[in-house]
Amino acid sequence: MPKSIDAPTNGVIVDLNKVSKYFADVPAVNGVSAQIREGEFFSLLGPSGCGKTTLLRMISGFEQPSSGSITIAGVPMEDVEANERPTNMVFQSYAIFPHLNVEENVAYGLKRLGLSKPEMLKQVNEVLKLVDLSGYNKRPAQTLSGGQRQRVALARALVLKPKVLLLDEPLSALDKKLREQMQIELRHLQRTVGITFILVTHDQEEALIMSDRIAVMLDGKIAQLASPQELYSRPVSKWVASFIGVMNFLQGDLFRDGGDKLSVDAGILGKISLNQEQIPVPVATGPVTIGIRPEMLTVLYDKNSTAEFELNAVIMESDYYGDMTYYTVKVEQSELVLIVSMRNTAGRTVLKEGDKARIGWGSESLVILAESTSSE
Amino acid sequence: MTQTISNKQNRTGLALVSTPLGFSLLLLAVPLTMVILMSFWTQNYLVLEHSFKLDNYIEAWTHPLYQQLMLRSVRISFLVTLATVLLSYPMAYFISFYGGNNKVRWLFLVTIPFWTSYLLRVFLWKVILGYNGVVNSTLDWLGIIEEPLVFILYNSNAVIIALTHAWAPFAILPIFVALEKIDRSYLEAATDLGDGPIRRFLRVTLPLSMPGVVAATLIVFIPTIGDYVTPKLVGGKDGLMIANMIQVQFGKANNAPLGSALAISAMGIVGMISILFVGLNRRWLKKE
């Protein structure tokens, strides 16, 4: 989309244009272009070393891009120092000043603005209420728990009403239960304040739960930028598919089915006709990778129940998760191994190793994947 | 069973601790007690009177000479401490923040003066600061001065210069350690919240490095007040300090009790100043 000159922001708050960062000739971020919209919850997701934190630090101004440009709220950031950018950061370690109490920590950035004392205190108390820490004003920083530190870090950044809030793996130091609670809370908080959040995370579940859009990064590049649903159901590459959730991969042969319809020959699974939705990126006919999510496969418990496609298989492994059971099954008369997940609803028995099972699926459950293009 | 084990552990512990304990009792507690006791006795020409009197303290605190020496010692020590900490802080800051992979090398360089004896180093200051010394001849050669500077040797300025140089490593190390312990994310957080380099230093780096500054201050202040080698060598007659007088009392003047009273008084003053300093610092840190 061509950029308009009259309306520089155009609903875009952070504009990354071919941003690269080299550390001693090694690219950490390699030509990333993305437009982050005003008011959205945006996540940079990827394994460690993929460049997501470097990208965040370039937006905050702690690192300078080796090439490319970053524009925030229509203003090029080339000559804007970190302390003058309209961004604030929640650090991975939270970086709560140990020599100050909660109130002083939260008021840290306000002190510079020359507000009256009552006005400052009012703003501090408002934001403390927002993060559910009312009355903690005088607590020394050292006495706070991990979750409380996280809230103080949020309050300290939000009180300055930044245009963009940057979060560098803010939940990774919390235990699982608290982390899950904070994921929901952060999402609510973002909706309440309406500020653009940019989150860096390596946890795909976290990104899916919280984000409006996710940029999956690999080797300094964006492998896919899409909404959580899009990312999960229509991954553009085998790598993205396996990074987000669990995916079964099969080899297949893509061919034209008479007219302009495409079908895939999936060997023992049969010939399946496809619709356009199932091919996220254009693929040439010939050998392709087919992806099927475990929940798209079903164990047909009932003798009478049928599915569009069926296979006989043997359970090799049964992993019980409480709400779900993941079965690793081997298709009979084939080397094909699949992972099938089933919800443990009332009356449904959990199958054991060696049990025989009929596996069913529909033609719409497949997705055709290009080979991983980003990992070269 | 547990009883025997804990007994055994107790015995091992006692065995381990007894040597240093005996050492410090013999070399620290005993002499200190003796000095305290002696300070209440009286030297009556050649006889030491073992009576309990405050006369020595009265003399130590009222005689103008001793007052003057004591005040001068505190003033010199204070100025040495101030100069040492002010000069050491940037040094430590540089090593900690810009030392990169060479931090150990820098610290190694800081300790190089210790490779020569202290006496030698003080004598070198004579060579540097003297009438025909390095400083004067250089300034003369440059045409900056016509007459050699005389205020830099054989007075308290020379003592301050020599002591500041001698104690710098003792100040650099604790400040360096304190700076190293500051998590760099605090500095990034301060920047992120809008502080420029100077405000950030005053609001985060300095307060968080205060423990190192306090340690450096005490490490320099406490021993320098009792220094007597430096004033004797480069202090001239105007640069003498209380420790020189204590030495005289124990030696030539043959008045060990008065010397003891002066020593205990000096110790008391150092102690009081140090406690006051630590207390003030703690309150100041609490406030901000």
Image (cartoon, rainbow, N blue to C red):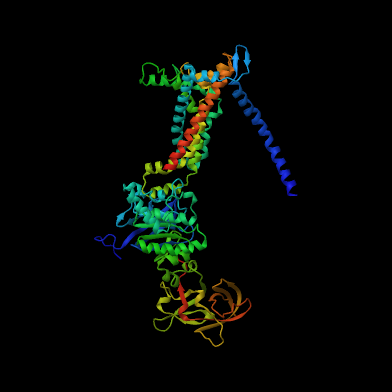
Does residue B190 appear left or right of residue A354 in this picture? left
Q: In the picture, which quadrant includes the N terminus of chain A?
A: bottom left
Q: How far from the left and from the top, in percent, is residue A324?
A: 54, 73
Where does the image place residue A65, in percent across and percent down from the top left? 38, 53
Q: A61 or A279: which is nearer to us?
A: A61
Does the rendering let one see residue B30?
yes
Residue at the limit of the structure toward the bottom, as seen here: A304
Residue B257, compared with residue A46, is above or below; it is above
Q: Residue furthest left?
A: A6
Q: Estimate the x, y position of residue B40 in percent, counting from the top left.
A: 58, 21
Question: What residue do we see at 38% from left, 60% from top?
Answer: A197
B61 vs A9, left or right, is right
Q: Is residue B117 above or below residue A212?
A: above
Residue B106 appears in the rendering: no
Q: How many marks?
A: 0
Residue A108 versus residue A225: which sits nearer the camera?
A108
Q: Is residue A373 left or right of residue B24?
A: left
Answer left or right for A114 relative to B23: left
Q: Toward the viewer: B252 or B87?
A: B252
Q: Residue at x 59, y 16 (%)?
A: B42
Snapshot quadrant of residue B205: top left
Name above or below for residue A331 compared with residue A60: below
**Where does the image place residue A51, in percent across and percent down from the top left?**
44, 57
